[in-house]
Protein backbone atom coordinates (compact mmCIF):
# COMPACT_ATOMS: atom_id res chain seq x y z
CA UNK A 1 0.00 0.00 0.00
CA UNK A 2 1.18 3.49 -0.81
CA UNK A 3 1.64 5.30 2.49
CA UNK A 4 0.41 8.63 1.12
CA UNK A 5 -2.64 7.32 -0.71
CA UNK A 6 -4.97 5.27 1.47
CA UNK A 7 -7.79 3.15 -0.03
CA UNK A 8 -10.42 5.83 0.61
CA UNK A 9 -8.41 8.52 -1.16
CA UNK A 10 -7.76 6.15 -4.04
CA UNK A 11 -11.50 5.44 -4.30
CA UNK A 12 -12.27 9.17 -4.22
CA UNK A 13 -9.78 9.73 -7.05
CA UNK A 14 -11.47 7.00 -9.11
CA UNK A 15 -14.87 8.55 -8.45
CA UNK A 16 -13.59 11.95 -9.55
CA UNK A 17 -12.35 10.42 -12.79
CA UNK A 18 -15.76 8.78 -13.26
CA UNK A 19 -17.65 12.04 -12.80
CA UNK A 20 -15.23 13.79 -15.19
CA UNK A 21 -15.98 11.13 -17.80
CA UNK A 22 -19.72 11.52 -17.18
CA UNK A 23 -19.39 15.28 -17.64
CA UNK A 24 -17.76 14.75 -21.07
CA UNK A 25 -20.47 12.26 -22.08
CA UNK A 26 -23.31 14.54 -20.98
CA UNK A 27 -21.70 17.50 -22.77
CA UNK A 28 -21.56 15.34 -25.91
CA UNK A 29 -25.27 14.61 -25.54
CA UNK A 30 -25.99 18.33 -25.30
CA UNK A 31 -23.83 19.01 -28.35
CA UNK A 32 -26.01 16.54 -30.29
CA UNK A 33 -29.40 17.70 -28.99
CA UNK A 34 -30.53 18.59 -32.54
CA UNK A 35 -28.95 15.58 -34.28
CA UNK A 36 -31.70 13.30 -35.64
CA UNK A 37 -31.31 9.71 -34.49
CA UNK A 38 -28.61 10.47 -31.90
CA UNK A 39 -28.78 8.10 -28.95
CA UNK A 40 -28.12 9.76 -25.58
CA UNK A 41 -25.35 8.17 -23.54
CA UNK A 42 -24.57 8.05 -19.85
CA UNK A 43 -21.88 6.65 -17.58
CA UNK A 44 -22.58 3.75 -15.29
CA UNK A 45 -20.43 3.49 -12.18
CA UNK A 46 -22.88 3.44 -9.28
CA UNK A 47 -23.01 -0.38 -9.13
CA UNK A 48 -19.23 -0.54 -8.83
CA UNK A 49 -19.28 2.17 -6.16
CA UNK A 50 -21.95 0.34 -4.17
CA UNK A 51 -19.84 -2.82 -4.29
CA UNK A 52 -16.74 -0.91 -3.20
CA UNK A 53 -18.74 0.61 -0.31
CA UNK A 54 -19.89 -2.83 0.86
CA UNK A 55 -16.31 -4.13 0.77
CA UNK A 56 -15.02 -1.11 2.71
CA UNK A 57 -17.84 -1.36 5.28
CA UNK A 58 -17.07 -5.04 5.81
CA UNK A 59 -13.45 -4.27 6.62
CA UNK A 60 -12.17 -5.71 3.35
CA UNK A 61 -9.82 -4.10 0.90
CA UNK A 62 -11.30 -1.36 -1.24
CA UNK A 63 -10.93 -2.22 -4.93
CA UNK A 64 -8.03 -0.37 -6.51
CA UNK A 65 -10.12 0.58 -9.55
CA UNK A 66 -13.73 1.59 -10.02
CA UNK A 67 -14.86 0.89 -13.57
CA UNK A 68 -16.84 3.60 -15.34
CA UNK A 69 -18.71 2.38 -18.40
CA UNK A 70 -20.26 4.52 -21.14
CA UNK A 71 -23.67 3.11 -22.08
CA UNK A 72 -26.66 4.14 -24.13
CA UNK A 73 -29.30 5.75 -21.92
CA UNK A 74 -32.03 3.09 -22.09
CA UNK A 75 -34.49 5.18 -20.03
CA UNK A 76 -34.40 8.16 -22.40
CA UNK A 77 -37.64 8.89 -24.26
CA UNK A 78 -37.49 8.68 -28.05
CA UNK A 79 -38.39 11.86 -29.93
CA UNK A 80 -40.07 12.03 -33.33
CA UNK A 81 -36.72 12.42 -35.10
CA UNK A 82 -35.37 9.26 -33.43
CA UNK A 83 -33.09 11.13 -31.02
CA UNK A 84 -33.16 10.30 -27.33
CA UNK A 85 -31.59 13.54 -26.08
CA UNK A 86 -33.92 15.48 -23.79
CA UNK A 87 -32.41 18.91 -23.09
CA UNK A 88 -34.00 19.31 -19.63
CA UNK A 89 -33.02 15.79 -18.55
CA UNK A 90 -29.42 16.30 -19.68
CA UNK A 91 -29.14 19.66 -17.91
CA UNK A 92 -30.40 18.16 -14.64
CA UNK A 93 -27.92 15.28 -14.91
CA UNK A 94 -25.09 17.67 -15.72
CA UNK A 95 -25.95 19.81 -12.69
CA UNK A 96 -26.13 16.78 -10.38
CA UNK A 97 -22.87 15.41 -11.74
CA UNK A 98 -21.13 18.75 -11.23
CA UNK A 99 -22.28 18.78 -7.61
CA UNK A 100 -20.96 15.25 -6.98
CA UNK A 101 -17.69 16.03 -8.73
CA UNK A 102 -17.11 19.20 -6.69
CA UNK A 103 -18.05 17.49 -3.42
CA UNK A 104 -15.56 14.66 -4.01
CA UNK A 105 -12.83 17.15 -4.93
CA UNK A 106 -13.46 19.00 -1.66
CA UNK A 107 -13.37 15.79 0.38
CA UNK A 108 -10.13 14.67 -1.26
CA UNK A 109 -8.56 18.11 -0.79
CA UNK A 110 -9.59 18.03 2.88
CA UNK A 111 -7.95 14.60 3.33
CA UNK A 112 -4.71 15.91 1.83
CA UNK A 113 -4.85 19.01 4.04
CA UNK A 114 -5.19 16.73 7.08
CA UNK A 115 -2.21 14.64 5.95
CA UNK A 116 -0.15 17.78 5.41
CA UNK A 117 -1.01 19.03 8.91
CA UNK A 118 -0.11 15.64 10.39
CA UNK A 119 3.25 15.65 8.61
CA UNK A 120 3.98 19.15 9.90
CA UNK A 121 2.96 18.08 13.41
CA UNK A 122 -0.07 20.34 13.53
CA UNK A 123 -2.67 17.60 13.91
Image: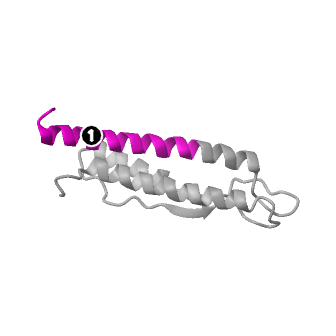
> Horizontally, is 36 left or right of 45 in the view?
right
Residue 7 drawn at (x, y percent): 26, 51
Q: How many marks?
A: 1
Foreground pick, 58 / 80: 80
Q: Position of residue 12 (x, y in %)?
A: 36, 49
Q: Residue placed farthest to the top in the image?
A: 123
Classify residue 7 as left or right of residue 79. Answer: left
Residue at the (23%, 38%) spot, across then down: 114
Left or right: residue 73 compared with residue 49: right
Residue drawn at point x = 32 percent, y = 38 percent:
110
Q: Which quarter of the figure is the C terminus placed in?
A: top left
Give the crowd class for mark 1: few <14, some 14-19, many >=20 residues within 10 Å: few
- Looking at the picture, does residue 57 appear above or below residue 87? above
Residue extent of the magenta highlight? 96-123
- Say if the magenta span includes residue 81: no
Disc 1 target residue? 113
In the rendered image, residue 73, in percent from the top left (x then y), is placed at: 66, 58
Identify whether 118 is placed above or below 61.
above
Percent x, y for residue 36? 83, 66
Callout 1: SS: helix
Give left or right: position of 106 versus 9.
right
Please tell me whether residue 115 belongs to the stretch shown in magenta: yes
Dividing the image into 4 quarters, which one contains the N terminus? Answer: bottom left
Check the image and tell me how it is coloured: one colour
- Quadrant location of residue 98? top right
Amino acid sequence: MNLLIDPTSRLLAEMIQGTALRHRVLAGNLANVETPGYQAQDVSFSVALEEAGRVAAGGGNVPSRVQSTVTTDADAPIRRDGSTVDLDRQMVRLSQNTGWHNAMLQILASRFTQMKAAIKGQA
